[in-house]
Image (spheres, rainbow, N blue to C red):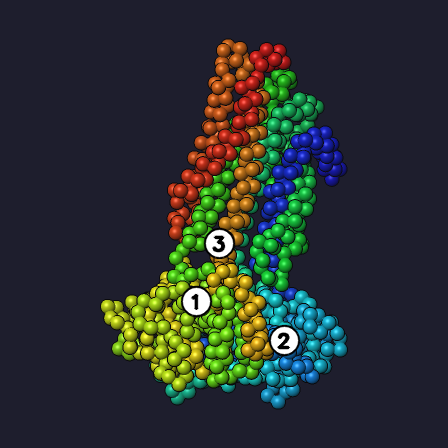
Amino acid sequence: METLLKDIRFGLRMLAARPAFTAIAVLTLALGIGANTSIFTLFDALLLESLPVREPARLVLFSNELSEGTFTGRAPTGAWPWFPFGFYEFLGKQSLPLESVCAFRMGDARVAIHFPGSDASQLQRGTMHLVSGNYFSVMGVDAAIGRALAPSDDQPNAAPAAVISYSYWQRRLGSDPAAIGKAVILNGTAFTIVGVAPAEFFGERVRHAPDFWLPLIFQPRMEPYDHLHQADAYWLNMIGRLRPRATPEQAQAAVTVALRQFLTNEAGEHLTETRAKAISSSYIQLHDGSRGVSDLRFLYSQPLHILLAVVGLVLLIASANVGSLLLARAAARRPEISVRLALGAGRGRLIRQMLTESLLLAAIGAVCGLLLAHWGVKLLETFTDNGSPQQPRLNLPVLFFTVGVTVLAGIVFGLAPALQSARTDLVTALKAGSPGAVGASRRLGATRGLMIAQIAVSLVLLVGASLLARTLLNLEHLPLGFDPNNVLLARIDPRLADYKPQAVAALYKQLLDRLSALPGVRAATIGYYSPLSGSKSTYDATVEGYSPSPGDKLEPEGIYVSPDFSKVFGIPLVLGRAIGFQDTAASPKVAMVNETFVHNIFPNQNPIGHRFTMNGNNSYEIVGVMKDAHFQDPREKQGSVVFLSILQEQSPDALRAEIALRTEGDARDISTALRKIVAQTDPRIPVTGVTTLREQVDSSFNRQRLAARFVGSFSALALLLACVGLYGVVAQDVARRRTEIGVRMALGARSRGILWMVFRDTLVLFIGGVLLGIPSAFAASKLISTQLYGLKTGDAVSFLMATAVLGVTAAFAAFVPAHRASRVEPMVALRYE
């Protein structure tokens, strides 16, 4: 320890004695370590951070496909993603390797909220989460104020109780402790607030906390359909807590056995051989529940993994730069090292001293890097705009990561100079006397090797940035089948104003008449959802006279629309007529279909007049064919789509609506007028999610945009570091060959010849780096192949663009030393030598 302290003190003195060298090395390392720390901070927050609950490692999810929808019909086979209420009750009576299991209904169900005594103008909009009574105990969460929901709250005769989120308590109730015990009316039912959830708790899904957690038993009162008593409704998600020392594998086997027993009991005397086979193929797959479920994890997982690799390469370039500086510094310290060897210092002792200095340099760089990372994380948050309750922050895992990166970087860039110093030949070094005379070629060879590696790594990053940028360009210019410009979107929810499905058509007709009359509005429509909104509804369909192939199911996407849907979204009608105002609940049900539907079902036939049924209930006549348009990911194969009249629909599905306006100018200019029209029609209906179709389309490419933006930024940083490193190598080489250059010029060499000599050496480094980088870039591009669209991993244009940019950078880095060499005065160079 005493020796180590001496090494540290000596290392600090050496760094202080050369402030210029130390500043450049620290800044280079700070950029590399800061970039790594920033990305890992975001990586930790979005992908690694556990739920803020008791012992989150013991939580298991019954599916990683948490859904806000409902599947009604035949029981699923294979891995079950959703469950009926009856199975949850059955599971509670079994002996399992689970302490308990809770059920919940995914949030974002909309509710009307107002306190008793308030008038209609004070109606608010909020979100709820339907949960079983043991939800909070299974999750391992206690109320911050009051109490959590209990199993007794989830009984048929229980008084309606609610737990509110901490943010709602602050935002709407002014953090008033007296809110406990007050009543709040949700969808016409008065619930008593019994508790406030902890500030950090947001539920099992990584998103902002719902306003209310309500007992599951009240589902029929809160939602249009009664799923609680519907045996064939698959709508619940479940989470379990493992018993101590129980494994997820044991629990998975036990709940699968319970599922098959439940299905067998349900079948009873109707258990056929086919049904028994389906039951035997059904199972439950348990997933790690410690981190909850996050849409952001799906959205950003692959880009963040790519970025971690990218910033790792940036740190490698920074380390190579510092390694080059240390090699040059080690050559200057040859007399010191020779004297220490002559006085009896062991080579191991010298290596330790040099590595200590390297680690000190890395530690100082890490401290500065953490300061840069603090600013970088704020910048990354604005780039991602993730809306997650788990915000990136510099916590212990991030600090441990930074320490690990620092130690690794210190060893990487310090090992080569340390080994070279230890290999110094004592007799030769003392005899030579000049630090530049002996070992220069070896040192220069090592430095050039590092420079070639930097160029190769920079090429890998530039190729990746080029591929991702061109992918984004391809996606943004991809034919979508609709016109995204000058379209305003806004969601309304008539359920909040107590509209019934039978009465909503009159509301929509009134809204369309008023909105169409607005100045600047070319057309107005109301639909289920718009293109690339992230929503999707599919239905089982049966077409008269068509039999699908064995194993195939006809499940087209179904979208409810009103008149002028085609005109507003710019989707041409290619055959027949469009849905109109004459298509009401009193008239025969009609539908439009897209070209893919016709191609799959009616090849070489006229589909007009043909009929199909949806979910085995209503029969629809095809009256029109619309051109194909992408409502889902445009990179996926176009699927079949049917368009149904929302004015004919009298089920709760008609209560989901989105207004769309085609405008003459900027669509945002109409937003205030739209809100006013809706308020005049019915002030109880809130307008939410106001955006433009162009913004919605752009946001659908956020993952590609994030990857292209970040990889491009860090590639630029890597290019800058490589440029600085190349400049240092060339300048160092020119300084070493100063006498040679003076002799050449004294013998008649021209400036252009000296320029070419320097550029030629740079060209050798560049070619070496390119030859090493091209196969590496080709291999690395395969790792991002799933992020690409319209490009192959070996895209020649991307490789040529990256090589050209790198070549220009190399020429720029070599120009100043080359220009300086061409201006050397022969007599001055020879005199100083």
User: Residue 557, percent across and down?
Assistant: 40, 71
- Name the residue that disc number 2 marks: 124
160 or 40, nearer to the observer: 160
User: Residue 719, percent across and down?
Assistant: 53, 38
Q: Earlier in the sequence, mark 2 or mark 3?
A: 2
- Name the residue that disc number 3 marks: 704
Do we see residue 15 in this rendering? yes
Neighbor class of circle 3 (other Cα within 10 Å; few <14, some 14-19, many 20+) is many
Quadrant housing the C terminus: top right
Neighbor class of circle 1 (other Cα within 10 Å; few <14, some 14-19, many 20+) is many
Give me the disc on residue 825. Answer: none
Q: Tell me what residue is drawn at x 69 percent, y 40 percent.
A: 364
Which amino acid is tagged 1? Answer: Val
Placement of 419 over or under 265, stated as above or below: above
307 or 713, nearer to the observer: 713
Give me the disc on residue 568. Answer: 1
User: Residue 409, percent across and down?
Assistant: 60, 41
Q: Tell me what residue is drawn at x 59 percent, y 69 percent.
A: 204
* Helix, strand or loop for disc 3: helix
Which amino acid is tagged 3? Answer: Gln
